[in-house]
């Protein structure tokens, strides 16, 4: 391969997407800490006093954050398949995602469930190690694919993202080549008519409206995330698509804000806007989906409006980009543990919230820095590549 050809086919690192992924992962600490004070959400530990303000602010993140994580993961999958081929890609994803999933399911995910029982019943004094085997008493349940294990106390918790990502990668690998060929034709069409980028809002609206939104998976239906993942794989790094995203960013962003505002009556008035089949609930879910697509595409376009000449992130962003998966795996049990200790304080909500956030961030980064990042074994267990020494 000539040097000129290699430059043309080697993707330039998307620094803005590294920043976006780090923002979402760290934002989950703030988000899950806020659910402690949400009057509607059934979080593991609840404060006695709650405020509806949390519900409104949570919606601003739910509409775009997790969809964006799946889109960025799809983009990374495209680059991985180019380097490794479909089989190598499937093996690599099973290893890098499957190992931390198994480890965390065995040792980390049971903690919030145990704390939920202790918070709900002051008379519950069962030790964690007595609860642990009951958590792991499971049976196969293929009807909830890809969440194929079920049990009275068992859950995947916040690792639903990892479960879905493994499933999406394995579904993609056998059809990666023909899908990429179809993406080339789609990119040509979008180059001629940029407004075609709005079309994915239609199947997203259909999925959420007809299959229902799932509160356990950050408000979206699990299969809606597959579309974001596939868009990231197929189109998000194509220069023609990126040009269209930049061109449409502002008007699509405005449309997304308007669509999101239009969901307020439905989320406020419907008995169960996530699953009801009333016209109001169906239209609310469809509007929410369209708003989410607009927000994601507008954010991509706005972040890409300035040329990025650097191919490597700075020290802080580089640190956070590599740490994204371990921080994600670690964050929720730590937040729940801090919330369990803080909700009993006699203090305003703002003070409790700040204590949970600050304490959780400190502990998460300390555990990552001294318990994960520094040894080959722990890096492997948390899905990180071996450390490399810069020359």
Image (cartoon, helix red, strand yellow):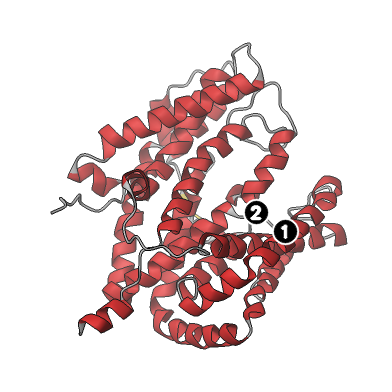
Verify CB contact (< 8 Å) between mark 2 and mark 1. yes
Position above or below: 11 against 51:
below
165 and 149: which is toward the camera: 165
Q: Residue at x 37, y 41 (%)?
A: 106
- Crowdedness of circle 2 by 10 Å Cα count: few (<14), some, many (20+)? many
Name, please, the residue furthest toward the top.
346
> From mark 2 to mark 1, how far is it between C-alphas?
7 Å
Position above or below: 377 against 86:
above
- In percent of width and height, residue 186 lies at 55, 84
SS for callout 1: helix
Q: Residue at x 49, y 46 (%)?
A: 23
SS for callout 2: loop
In the picture of the structure, the residue carrying the numbered disc 1 is 288
Report whether 313 appears left or right of 228.
left
- In percent of width and height, residue 340 lies at 53, 23
Instruction: Name the N-terminal-most of marks 2 and 1.
Output: 2
- In percent of width and height, residue 303 lies at 52, 59
Q: Quadrant of residue 95?
A: bottom left
Q: Quadrant of residue 279?
A: bottom right
- Crowdedness of circle 1 by 10 Å Cα count: few (<14), some, many (20+)? many
- In percent of width and height, residue 214 lies at 65, 53
309 and 76: which is toward the camera: 309
Where is the C terminus found, in terms of image quarters? Answer: bottom left
67 and 160: which is toward the camera: 67
Where is the N terminus found, in terms of image quarters? Answer: bottom left
Report whether 302 appears left or right of 267.
left
User: Is residue 335 in sight in this rendering?
Assistant: yes
In the picture of the structure, the residue carrying the numbered disc 2 is 63
């Amino acid at each position: 391969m000539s040097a000129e050809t290699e430059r043309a086919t080697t993707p330039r690192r998307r620094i803005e997407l590294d920043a976006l992924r780090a923002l979402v992962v760290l934002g989950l600490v703030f988000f899950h800490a806020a659910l402690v004070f949400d009057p509607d959400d059934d979080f593991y530990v609840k404060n006695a006093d709650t405020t509806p303000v949390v519900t409104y602010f949570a919606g601003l993140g739910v509409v775009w954050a997790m969809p964006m994580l799946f889109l960025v993961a799809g983009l990374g999958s495209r680059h991985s398949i180019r380097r490794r081929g479909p089989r190598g890609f499937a093996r690599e994803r099973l290893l890098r995602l499957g190992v931390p999933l198994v480890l965390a399911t065995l040792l980390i995910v049971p903690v919030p469930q145990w704390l939920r029982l202790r918070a709900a019943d002051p008379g519950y004094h069962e030790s964690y190690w007595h609860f642990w085997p009951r958590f792991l008493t499971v049976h196969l349940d293929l009807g909830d694919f890809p969440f194929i294990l079920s049990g009275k106390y068992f859950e995947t918790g916040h690792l639903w993202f990892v479960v879905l990502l493994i499933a999406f990668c394995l579904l993609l690998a056998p059809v990666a080549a023909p899908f990429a060929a179809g993406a080339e034709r789609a990119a040509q069409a979008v180059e001629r008519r940029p407004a075609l980028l709005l079309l994915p809002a239609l199947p997203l609206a259909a999925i959420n409206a007809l299959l229902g939104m799932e509160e356990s998976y950050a408000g979206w239906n699990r299969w809606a995330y597959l579309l974001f993942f596939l868009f990231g794989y197929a189109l998000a790094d194509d220069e023609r698509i990126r040009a269209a995203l930049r061109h449409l960013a502002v008007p699509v962003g405005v449309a997304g804000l308007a669509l999101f505002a239009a969901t307020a009556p439905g989320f406020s008035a419907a008995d169960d806007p996530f699953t009801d089949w009333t016209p109001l609930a169906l239209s609310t879910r469809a509007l929410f989906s369209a708003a989410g697509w607009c927000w994601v595409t507008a954010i991509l376009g706005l972040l890409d409006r300035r040329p990025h000449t650097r191919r490597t992130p700075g020290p802080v962003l580089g640190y956070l980009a590599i740490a994204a998966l371990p921080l994600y795996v670690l964050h929720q049990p730590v937040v729940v543990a801090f919330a369990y200790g803080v909700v009993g304080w006699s203090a305003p909500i703002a003070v409790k919230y700040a204590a949970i956030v600050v304490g959780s961030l400190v502990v998460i980064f300390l555990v990552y820095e001294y318990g994960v990042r520094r040894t080959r074994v722990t890096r492997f267990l948390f899905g990180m590549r071996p450390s490399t020494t810069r020359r």
